[in-house]
Image (cartoon, grey):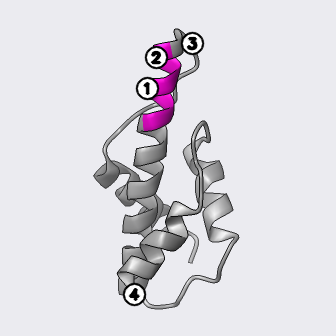
Amino acid sequence: AIATLTRFTDLFDFTGMRFDNALRLFLGSFRLPGEAQKISRIMEVFAARYHACVTAGNAVLRAAGGEGELYESDADSYYVLAYSVIMLNT
C-alpha cells in the first residue's frame, strides 16, 4: 500500500510551488480517509515528495544563478505542517 501511495505521489511535480498550493493540488486528486493513522501516512509521503521537489528546484535555480528560491526545510517539518493543517480543518 505504501509503495502504491509513493508511486502515486511521484506523479506530482511540486517544483516551484508554495507549500499550500502543493498540498491543495495533492489533496484535490483524491478523498482523504477518515482514520488519523492513514492520513498521517499519506502526509508523510506527500512531505517527502514535496521536500524532494523543493530541494531539486532550488538546486536548479542556484546552478542557473536565478533568484526566487523557495524556503527549504526538512521533510519532517513539511510533514508536521501538512498533518497540522489537515487536523485543523477537520
Between the C-alphas of marks 1 and 4, the distance is 31 Å
Asked whether disc 2 touches disc 3, contact meaning CB atoms under 8 Å apart, the reply is: yes
Residue that badge 3 annotates: 66
**Relative to 51, does residue 32 appear above or below in the rendering?**
below
Between the C-alphas of marks 4 and 3, the distance is 39 Å
Which label number is shown at residue 59? Answer: 1
Q: Is residue 27 left or right of residue 45?
A: right
Q: Residues within 10 Å of mark 3 (few under 14, many from 20)?
A: few
What residue is rendered at 57% in x and 13% in y? 67
Q: Residues within 10 Å of mark 2 (few under 14, many from 20)?
A: few
Between the C-alphas of marks 2 and 3, the distance is 6 Å
Between the C-alphas of marks 1 and 2, the distance is 5 Å
Looking at marks 1 and 4 on the same chain, the residue that comes earlier in the sequence is marked by 4
In the image shown, does 69 or 79 lie closer to the viewer? 69
Which label number is shown at residue 41? Answer: none
Between the C-alphas of marks 4 and 2, the distance is 36 Å
Residue that badge 2 annotates: 62
What's the amino acid at mark 2?
Arg
In the image shown, does 19 or 15 lie closer to the viewer? 15
Range of residues picked out in magenta: 56-63
